[in-house]
Amino acid sequence: MKQFMILASVLTLFACETNAQKLNITTIYSEPNRVTREVPETGAVHNYTTRKEVTERLNPMIVMTSKNAEILKFRIQGNISSGRLNINQVMKIRFEKGEQNANSITLRYYVEIKKIPGKEGSDVVGYNYTKDETYC
């Protein structure tokens, strides 16, 4: 019983450590916006509906969160478009460590997108993604 408790506590510690590098995905929503426009030539009034994004899109970038002597922690963020008759989902983010020259470092990441056949909800416009990484 004692060994089981020790094993469970060690596994819990490992789970907490890996949770920091988890891929977080949030949905970008839109709402209908009613617009009225008059045609100057005929004088007729046309009503139509457009969609306005409610959720802000994240700009694709790498942001450094903390820097120690040997360890760099940074956040990878961005967005993808998805909607109507094609569903795009982020499967994973592949990170490549680049060259380090004096005070500069080259980081490269690739977002793998899976295309799923089907229909997306009318309020969904895309997805934001964020992931925290550590560079040693």
Image: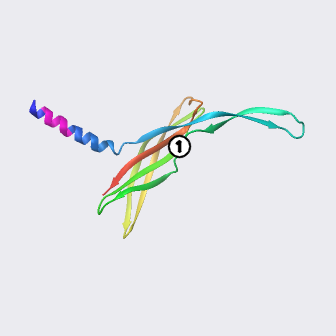
Quadrant in which the C terminus appears: bottom left
The residue that label 1 is drawn on is 80
Question: Magenta region, mostly helix, strand or loop?
Answer: helix
Q: Which residue lies furthest to the left in this view?
A: 2
Amino acid type assigned to the residue bearing label 1 in the image:
Ile
Instruction: Depth check: give the residue in front, 111 or 68.
Output: 68
Q: What element carries label 1?
A: strand
Residue 25 lies, in percent from the top left, at 45, 39
Quadrant in which the N terminus appears: top left
Q: Give the residue drawn at x 46%, y 43%.
A: 129
Q: Give the residue drawn at x 52%, y 50%.
A: 59
Residue stretch rendered in magenta on the structure: 4-10
* Residue 18 falls in image quadrant: top left
Q: Is residue 19 visible?
A: yes
Image: 119 above or below 93? above
Q: Residues within 10 Å of mark 1 (few under 14, many from 20)?
A: some
Q: Does the magenta stretch include residue 6?
A: yes
Question: Position of 63 compared to 30: left or right?
Answer: left
* Residue 117 falls in image quadrant: top right
Residue 70 lies, in percent from the top left, at 29, 61
Instruction: Depth check: give the residue in front, 114 or 50.
Output: 50
Q: Give the residue drawn at x 86%, y 33%.
A: 44
Image: 85 above or below 131? above
